Amino acid sequence: MTEEEPEPIRRRPGGRAARVRQAVLAAAAELLAEEGVDRLSIAGVAARAGVNETTVYRRWGTREKLVLDAMLTGSNEGIPVPDTGAVRTDLAAFARALAQYLATPTGRSVARAAVLSSDDPDLAEAWQTFWQSRLDQAGAIVDRAVARGELPTDTDTALALELLCAPLQTRALLGHRPIEPDLPERLTDMVLDGLRGKSQALHSFGRS
Amino acid sequence: MTEEEPEPIRRRPGGRAARVRQAVLAAAAELLAEEGVDRLSIAGVAARAGVNETTVYRRWGTREKLVLDAMLTGSNEGIPVPDTGAVRTDLAAFARALAQYLATPTGRSVARAAVLSSDDPDLAEAWQTFWQSRLDQAGAIVDRAVARGELPTDTDTALALELLCAPLQTRALLGHRPIEPDLPERLTDMVLDGLRGKSQALHSFGRS
DNA sequence: CGCCTAACGCAAGCATCCTTGCGTTAATGT
DNA sequence: ACATTAACGCAAGGATGCTTGCGTTAGGCG
């Protein structure tokens, strides 16, 4: 983030520093999954990592930055992007996987952490790239569908995925309603066909 | 919330207690709009309300409960629900109003406050009714459309609105992308017609 | 009017978060 | 191997959030 030193200070990326960094980030990821974002304290992370509290404060500064770094660095697998040959099944599988991930303590914490740190411009931008990279992968689903002629050529890939994912995210974030098992499928249908339910009328499009 | 006293203690709803309550809630609402949720402290609210800090702690306990009470009690106008005679224009106007509200410091704070307090079951349930009441009003748009024959009779009113509002909410919450002026209209189109873009084929429906 | 007590104000105190100064450890270049 | 110094540990201390005990104020009611 702040990797612009006009005066080239001799950094020490190997050895103890890297070891400490790994230990702290691993501890943060573990506590994130076990306790949740709000219960994650810097003191707790430092204790589990076997590191002094001061070190964490000096290297990361705030809880939000630490969590962000742990997410960016840690296993960045993301949601698996299926390729079944049809948009509907692809989107449904992806939505299902996303819903499953958001039901995970880690997934819930990641989403909440992003909200928590959305007031800091730097952090917000970092999270933006985080989501972007995840959505770009899923964008392949829509792009393939366009290439196959299942969707119009002027389809807005990002917006389409946003339409599919946003309801799942809000349910996970606001917690105002559980994510029913059939919700991913229903969302997929509504996104693809619209409220007017033209799946029958447009049958000829992408059917085998 | 915890208004279940088997032993009827003599409460005093009139006079000073009510005055204090009003002052505190008003101060909370003001600071919520001016500073945002995270910068809102109980000390600040008490100071502005001309009330001792202890009083606020005793009556509300936590910052989250205070904010919730301020939102439930305060001017509960919500988003205006238009009635233009056509779904498309109704939904577009509503989405526009929602986007405008979410761009407000207050609107943003309300959304974030709901996320912040989604781990407490009681608070989460209270927020649920809050959102529900707001969505129920907007549900009239969809219901009217179904009555007019613009939408299928098996349309899921709540889910339809969720599909329209969720993208706006996630943008406001995650802050990962600004809400462009034409986003409400685009969302409306996509929700009504689906990704396959049949707005042309169904031109006769709701265009002026 | 005058008693009773819910609700408030005040102040002390604890807990947690976060910062800072200083001495120590260990990675890096010669 | 040796000097240099980035990075860490330790301890003290300030800041803020939150609780608690006690005395005071002011509604509600006989």
Image: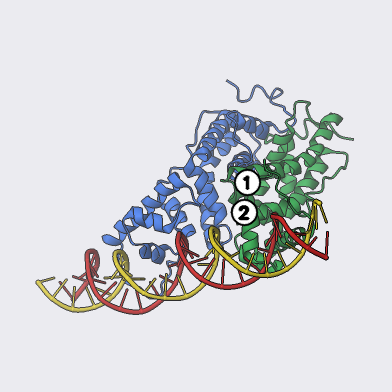
Chain colours: A green, B blue, C yellow, D red
Q: What element carries label 2?
A: helix
Where residue A23 appears, as percent x and y from the top left, is: 74, 63
Circle 2 packing at 10 Å, graded few (<14), some (14-19), many (20+), is some
Q: Which residue is drawn at 82% across and 42% down?
A: A90
Q: Which mark is residue B111?
A: none
Separation (CA) of disc 2 from disc 1: 8 Å
Q: In which quarter of the image is the C terminus of chain B?
A: top right
Query: Looking at the picture, does residue B207 appear above or below residue B102?
Result: above
Residue bearing mark 1: A123
Answer whether residue B194 is visible to the viewer in this image: yes
Circle 2 chain: A
Farthest residue in the top direction? B208
Q: Pointer 2 and pointer 1: residues touching (CB < 8 Å)?
A: yes
| Location of residue B197 (image quadrant) | top right
Q: Which mark is residue A64?
A: 2
Answer whether residue B14 is visible to the viewer in this image: no
Circle 1 packing at 10 Å, graded few (<14), some (14-19), many (20+), is some
